[in-house]
Image (cartoon, rainbow, N blue to C red):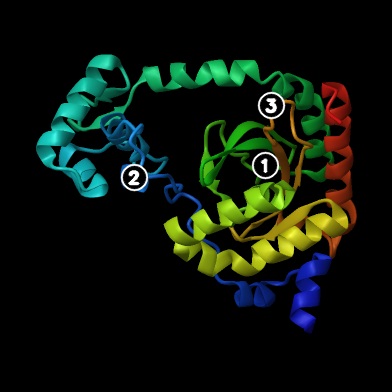
Amino acid sequence: MGSKQKKRRNGSAPQENRADYGAPVDWRAPAAHYLPDDFADDRQFAATLARGLEVLHCFTPRDTQLGNAELAERTGMAKATISRFTYTLVRLGYLRINRISGKYQLGPAVLSLGYPLLASLNIRQIARPFMKELADFVRGSVSLGMRDRLNVVYLESSRGDAPSIQPPDVGLSYPVARTAMGRALLAAYSHEEREGLINEIKVKTPEDWESFQQQITESIRDYREQGYCVSYGDLRREIHAVAVPMRSMADGTILVFNCGVSSFLLGDGQLTRDIGPRLVSMVRSVEAMMGVS
């Protein structure tokens, strides 16, 4: 193992060493998701419904307003088809028209649709004080997430007292391969589940696999050896993070916690020597409260 590799693994990861792992991606870019054509051979698959949902997936934190032409370009659908979908989605409340720009925005029905899921996850209430305590101690943020197809979506976040840290909003998602949280999920899966998801990443988002293959391999090894995975500015250059998956829930779902800290607040090796073990301890405490074993 070369000196640069050693520095990355012990937690220091100076700026010049991260260059070997590729520049951090644009964290505001849209997350990856499945497309209707991925299920062309499935006779039970409702392609029309899938295309309507694909329209909703076009909206991102960066692109909150889109017109029919932009939606047609992003989905590859005909403008007439997009017009029918947007009209229907507006009537159902999943889209609304911005009176100033004349473009479409997500409507309140989208938010209402997600609330029953959040309400059913009582782990958010149980974990919240543990997350806040750790976030305050490390002067960073602690978040809880779960997998959504090829992405990890945030379910809860807590911020410490450092003004430079802005935790991800609930509902924000990033591709699995790009984050410590996503790679911790990969590491926690069975061999068959992991290989299946990796194959999907290779096929559907080859650029993510090319950019983060080495980090994924390291994360799986780190999790086996230490119980957590790390990221040194892979998503946002100024944020270093560690992630720990929970043990599988009764329904088979695996949730994951991460802790992100501004790089300038971290001492040499602090992420792996101190914060990683603290996050592992926090997750074990949450599991005990949840009765997960």
Q: Residue at 77%, 43% (x, y): give it.
A: 139
Q: Residues under labels 2 and 1: Cα distance?
A: 50 Å
Tell me if mark 2 has few (under 14), some (14-19) or many (20+) residues whose alpha carbon lies within 10 angstroms of its own: few
Q: Residue at 53%, 58% (x, y): give it.
A: 199
Q: Nearer the viewer, mark 2 or mark 1?
A: 2
State yes or no: discs 2 and 3 in contact (Cβ < 8 Å).
no
Q: List x then y, in percent, for residue 40.
A: 31, 44
Q: List x then y, in percent, for residue 39.
A: 36, 43
Figure quadrant of residue 12: bottom right
Q: Residue at 80%, 60% (x, y): give it.
A: 222
Residue under pointer 1: 163
Taking the image as shown, residue 149 lies to the left or right of residue 280, namely left
Q: Amino acid at mark 1?
A: Pro
Nearer to me, 230 or 133: 230
Is label 1 in a helix, a strand or a loop? loop
Q: Amino acid at mark 3?
A: Asp
Residue under pointer 3: 251
Residue under pointer 2: 41
Q: List x then y, in percent, for residue 234.
A: 61, 61
Q: Would you place residue 261 above or below residue 21 in this image?
A: above
Q: Residues under labels 1 and 3: Cα distance?
A: 38 Å
Query: Along the polypeptide, which appears first: circle 2 or circle 3?
Result: 2
